[in-house]
Image (cartoon, grey):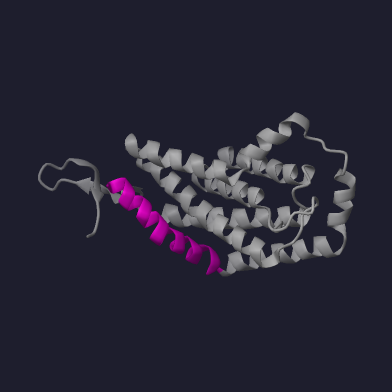
Amino acid sequence: KQASHEADDLVRRGFWRGYRVVFTEAENLLALAGAMGASVAIRETGVDNTIRNRIRGHRQLGDADEPIQLLGNPGTHFAAAGALWLGSAIVEDAKTHELARTLGEALAVNGATTVLLKAATNTRNPAGDRHSWPSGHTSSAFTVAAVLNEHYGPWVGAPSLALAGLVGYQRLDSREHDLSDVVFGGVLGYVVGSSIARDGKARLPELWGMQVVPYNDPETGAAGIALWKRY
């Protein structure tokens, strides 16, 4: 029951809180506007077409293509976040549970934004398929990498961001996306992930829908942690 309540709270409140955190910050809007301008410039100046022609018939990743594609798949990210959320709740690991909540919230905001932008722009990828901009694999991979970077610092964040960059390259190499799709997708994912992760760290961690708070017994002086919830 507690798990169901927490999941419902994440969907109803966490999602919209994440949207407010990301899209009401002037710094974020400026970064996204800059990325959009760069993306348009790449497309309109013919850079996308140049890269398309160079990659055609000269793919570089070979057998690594499928594993990297799976690594960048948003479905993989949601499944991993869900497994982490459930596992950390079972073992009562509040810190990891909060990370899983943050990942879920950030992935949901990024995913919804990416889908809306794809529907609004309806551009074609090198293979001729519609709804290309921005790259969903790239934006989702950078969302995860940005969250990990905020939670664990550069020792985890730098390799995660490098892997996200590799996902972006795979989208080019497989002719699933143009450079303009990948550039904006990467910036979008990073902005969403880092913003929501910073906001999450500023809040008290939660477990089973209850906040984990420091506790001190006034009679015995014993210190510890407690689960607290306002009804």
Quadrant of the rendered image containing residue 121: bottom right
Q: Horizontally, is 85 left or right of 177 in the view?
A: left
x, y percent for residue 34: 70, 65
The answer to whether 82 is drawn above or below residue 202 in the figure is above
Of 140 and 57, nearer the camera is 57
Identity of the residue furthest to the left in this view: 219
x, y percent for residue 120: 66, 67
x, y percent for residue 201: 43, 52
Magenta part of the protein: which range?
1-25
The answer to whether 47 is drawn above or below residue 96 in the figure is below
What is the tally of numbered marks visible in this picture? 0
Of 35 and 76, nearer the camera is 76
Let me know if residue 50 appears in the view: yes
Task: Report the residue at 86% width, 50% height from top.
Answer: 51
Task: Report the residue at 63% width, 58% height from top.
Answer: 188
Task: Report the residue at 61% width, 40% height from top.
Answer: 160
Task: Report the residue at 64% width, 44% height from top.
Answer: 161
Tell whether position 81 is magenta: no
